[in-house]
Image (cartoon, rainbow, N blue to C red):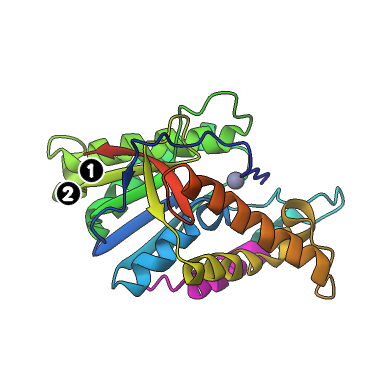
Amino acid sequence: MTHILAGAPLPGPGATLDLTPPGVVVAVGAHPDDIEFHCGATLARWGTQGAVVHLVICTDGSKGTWDPSADTTEVARARRTESEEAARALGATGEVVLLGAVDGELAGAAPGLHDELVATLRRLAPDVVVGHDPWRRYRLHPDHRAAGFLTVDACVAARDPHFVAHLGSAHRPDWLLLFEADEPDHVEVATPEALSVKVDALLAHRSQWRSTMFIDDVGDDEGRGRFTDGVRDAARLVGSAVGRPAGESFRRLAL
Ligand SMILES: [Zn+2]
């Protein structure tokens, strides 16, 4: 939905940098495109370093349009296709798991999705889980908050053998990285190549060009350039906070 990268809280100079590149990553986003917006460069780089990257998308993205007469079933269908294209552009070689909650209604659906996400985490056995920070203050979108709590709660349940014991063997990831963090304390450095891949993956979400990226159509080179510059500027701002050319910021939690 709406993504404003500029103005996000910046990490302090004491922030940690660059985890050991993980072998398996699960990224959890509320909507198609959230993952790419918030950690696309990080996932792209990890992919080139050999990580298997899986994407979990909580909602169907069916309300991601400004057109009041749009057929939301069609929107959801388009967004499924775009999610697969974006994963390919990102170099994510793992699964794209669609939890299928109705866009905008994740808070109500999340209790019913908890066990499915726990089972997914146990099955995919990630070293690192990446997701929304549920504690980001003054954030308006309820799906982002709900996706954050769903992710945090599922990580805790996945790691403990006495939680939902019927859902397979426990798996404890090493790290949970929360994006759009209220108090970021960790940065993954973004290479120029990874930022290009991030932009390509975002542009795969064609249905979001107008409403989120402010790009009119395929001929709108100016809009596309403006969007690309915005992504790079946001990454540079994060990087400058820690003395690096560019990066993506997170709250880092040990599991
Ligand atoms: Zn979103």
Viewer-closest of 234 and 2: 234
Viewer-closest of 172 and 163: 172
| Left or right placement of residue 131 versus residue 168 in this view | right
Query: Do labels 2 and 1 touch, CB within 8 Å?
Result: yes
What's the residue type where badge 1 is placed?
Ala
Residue at which label 2 appears:
171
Work out which quarter of the rendered image holds the C terminus and state it: top left
Q: Using the image, tell me which numbered label, if any, was put on residue 142.
A: none
User: Is 79 part of what is drawn in magenta?
Assistant: yes
* Coordinates of residue 227 in the picture (x, y in percent): 71, 59
- Secondary structure at badge 2 equals loop
Residue occupying the point 48% across, 57% down: 245
Among numbered discs 2 and 1, the one appearing first in the sequence: 1
* Coordinates of residue 17 in the picture (x, y in percent): 32, 48
Residue occupying the point 16% across, 41% down: 165
Instruction: Tell me the magenta residue range.
Output: 77-95
Residue occupying the point 17% across, 46% down: 172
Residue 179 position (above or below residue 226): above
